[in-house]
Amino acid sequence: MREVLEALIDDTDRQMPLLQAAIRAADVSATMRLAHYSKGACANLGAQAAAATLLNIERCAALGDFGECTVSLANLAAEVERLRAETIPGRSEAASAALGQQQPDSFGAQRRRVP
């Protein structure tokens, strides 16, 4: 089960920049599609807080409220980091040590710097 959760976290991590780009472009359909995809994966594996945040992004995109989508995306980034810390103990710290200092991303969350 741990491997499945790790895959979910990694996949959601990969989806966040795509979501961010769709939100910045105010692309309703892309934002809704990406949020819906990730929401289903999170809900199926019991990551209910992440799924609820993605549902909010999906609903706000449908209403054209991309400001709220941006706020929710920051919340999603924080939730993914929380899941990572709970699911993969030491991974965040080890990645930080291996990759150097963490820097904030455009969501306001701490993200690993990729060389």
Image: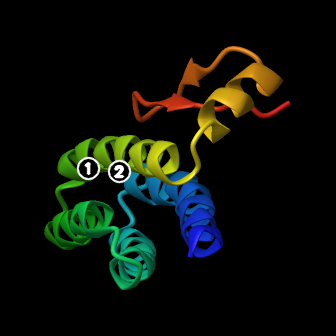
Secondary structure found at label 2: helix
- Residue 59 in sight in this render: yes
Q: Quadrant of the N terminus?
A: bottom right
Q: Quadrant of residue 91?
A: top right
Q: Is residue 92 above or below residue 12?
A: above
For residue 60, side relative to residue 8 (left or right): left
List x then y, in percent, for residue 14.
62, 59
Q: Secondary structure at mark 1?
A: helix
> Quarter of the image holding residue 37?
bottom left
Residue at the spot of label 2: 76
Indicate the quadrant where residue 39 lies. Answer: bottom left
Q: Which residue is mark 1?
A: 72
User: Residue at coordinates 78% horizontally, 34% vertically from top-left?
Assistant: 114
Instruction: Give yes or no for contact between labels 1 and 2 (Cβ–Cβ under 8 Å).
Output: yes
Left/right of residue 25 with respect to residue 94 in the rendered view: left
Q: What mark, if any, has residue 105 been given in the picture?
A: none
User: Residue at coordinates 68% horizontally, 14% vertically from top-left?
Assistant: 101
Amino acid at the residue labelled 1: Ser
Residue shown at 39% from the left, 68% from the top? 31
Q: Position of residue 82 (x, y in %)?
A: 40, 44
For label 2, count other residues whose C-alpha is less than 10 Å away and answer few (under 14), some (14-19) or many (20+): many
Mark 1 to mark 2 CA distance (whole Å): 6 Å
